Image (cartoon, helix red, strand yellow):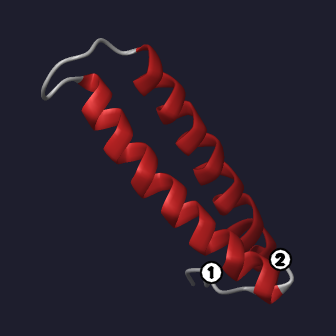
Amino acid sequence: MIPSIFRTELWHPMTAHFPLALLVMGGAFRLLGAFAPLGRNTLRGLAAQSARLVTVTGTVTAWVAWYTGG
């Protein structure tokens, strides 16, 4: 039998650690973009877009973690 992903002992890692990892990665992407070379369609633009997406996702999921008491 395959174990369920919705077991209660897995709620804390899913709701608390995932947002923390996303917010740390958002900061890492921001730093990467700060040190990347200027230019159109370069690593700087990709890092800025990735940082924005990861930071927004991390913020939303951190709110969910706070709301659920994770």
For the residue marked with disc 1, what is the amino acid?
Pro
The reply to whether discs 1 and 2 touch (Cβ–Cβ < 8 Å) is no
- The alpha-carbon separation of the residues under discs 1 and 2 comes to 22 Å
Locate residue 3, reporting x and y percent. Answer: 62, 81
Query: Which quadrant of the figure has residue 1?
Result: bottom right
Query: Which quadrant of the figure has residue 16?
Result: bottom right
Q: Residue at x 71, y 54 (%)?
A: 20
Q: Secondary structure at mark 2?
A: loop
- Give the numbered dot on residue 70: 2
Circle 2 crowding by C-alpha within 10 Å: few under 14, some 14–19, many from 20? some
Locate residue 51, reporting x and y percent. Answer: 44, 44
For the residue marked with disc 2, what is the amino acid?
Gly
Q: Residue at x 37, y 39 (%)?
A: 48
Q: Nearer the viewer, residue 49 or 64?
A: 49
Q: Nearer the viewer, residue 64 or 3?
A: 64
Would you place residue 29 above or below residue 17 in this image?
Answer: above
Q: Residue at x 53, y 55 (%)?
A: 55
What residue is disc 1 on? 3
Q: Secondary structure at mark 1?
A: loop
Q: Earlier in the sequence, mark 1 or mark 2?
A: 1
